[in-house]
Image: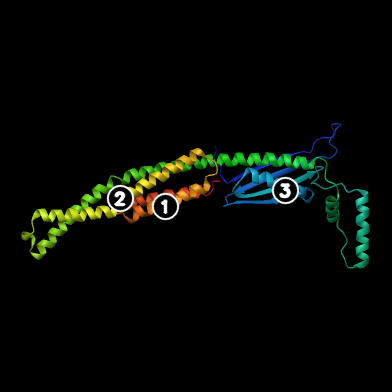
Amino acid sequence: MPVYSMTGYANSVAHPPKAEDGSTPTQASVSVELRSVNGRFLDFSLRMPDELRALEPQLRELVSGAFKRGKIEMRINTQRDGDGGWPQPQPEQLNRLANLEAKVRSWLPQAAPLSVHEALNLCRSAGASLPGLDNATLEAARDCVKGLAEARAREGARLVDVLLERIARLRELATEAEPLLPAVVARQQQRFLERWQEALNSTGAASSVPQEALQERALNEAAAFAIRIDVAEELARLRAHLDELTRLLKKGGEIGKRLDFLIQELHREANTLGSKSAALELTNISVEMKVAIEQMREQVQNLE
């Protein structure tokens, strides 16, 4: 199953069917445009001519059935007669407008007369819709929804590649961190021995303390220090989260929210690794992990 991004664009154009005799009495077309960006939930907005307003429930059902998350905007435009979409007003429409205008101005002499643009728009809204225009609109909308789904799938595939690269980098950093811990503990153990020796020498008690006791004390301190800085559990949990991320990305589907939660867990483990760090090398690894995780977070927020 593919992984879908919430970012995409698609458009489609359809024409009403020809008449039974094969002619097309009115040249017309309907264009549908879909734009999608990321969002926590499905937020669908629709811009369309009033003559197609009856199709709104079907269009909303079409989009909600195909997408679960994202801010999606659909724009529908109609074109007729190849002259910018102007209607051909009928005589009865113009007579009715003239009568209505005369009646209004008899009561309101200061009212402005109708302009040509206003008259054409009123004729358009009052006139019957072109036969077959509704079906053409639904056909274009279906093609556009399909195109947007394909665009979001292509973008999702690219995001998956980016995320898998970041996952591989985090695994490398975790592998680099593991062998550093014994070396840090060994250095600290030697430091404890030196400090104990300095303290005993300064007090003149070095000769009265057996070397074995001095070493045992230093080893105990080093063991306590090793427990405090041990990040084996953090690294194990980090690898488990990376395994789950990889599994979800390969499985596909609606995984955006689950990935976002796992990213938060990864960030927590990286923070703990940094807070327990007792060496510059571990601190640097923790910083690199946080950078990679933040890059993943930005990409995951675009996934459905």
| Spot occupied by residue 91 in the image (x, y as percentages of width and height) | 93, 49
Q: Do we see residue 226 in this rendering?
A: yes
For badge 3, the amino acid type reads Pro
Residue at 34% in and 51% down: 284
Question: Residue 101 in the image: x percent, y percent?
Answer: 91, 60
Which secondary structure lies at badge 3?
helix
In the picture of the structure, the residue carrying the numbered disc 3 is 57
Residue pointed to by mark 2: 281
> Mark 1 touching mark 2, by CB under 8 A?
no
Residue nearer the viewer, 142 or 294: 142
Q: Residues within 10 Å of mark 1 (few under 14, many from 20)?
A: many
- SS at circle 2: helix
- In percent of width and height, residue 86 lies at 82, 48
Residue sitting nearer the eye, 255 or 154: 255
| Residue drawn where x is 30% and y is 45% of the image | 178
In terms of sequence position, does the residue under pointer 1 or pointer 2 come before the other?
1
Q: Residue beneath label 1, please?
A: 267
Please report the residue visible at 22 percent of the width from the left and 53 percent of the height from the top: 223
Q: Nearer the viewer, mark 1 or mark 2?
A: 1
Looking at the image, the residue that sits furthest to the top is 21
Q: What is the three-letter code of the residue carrying label 2?
A: Glu
The disc placed on residue 294 is none
**Coloration of the structure image:** rainbow
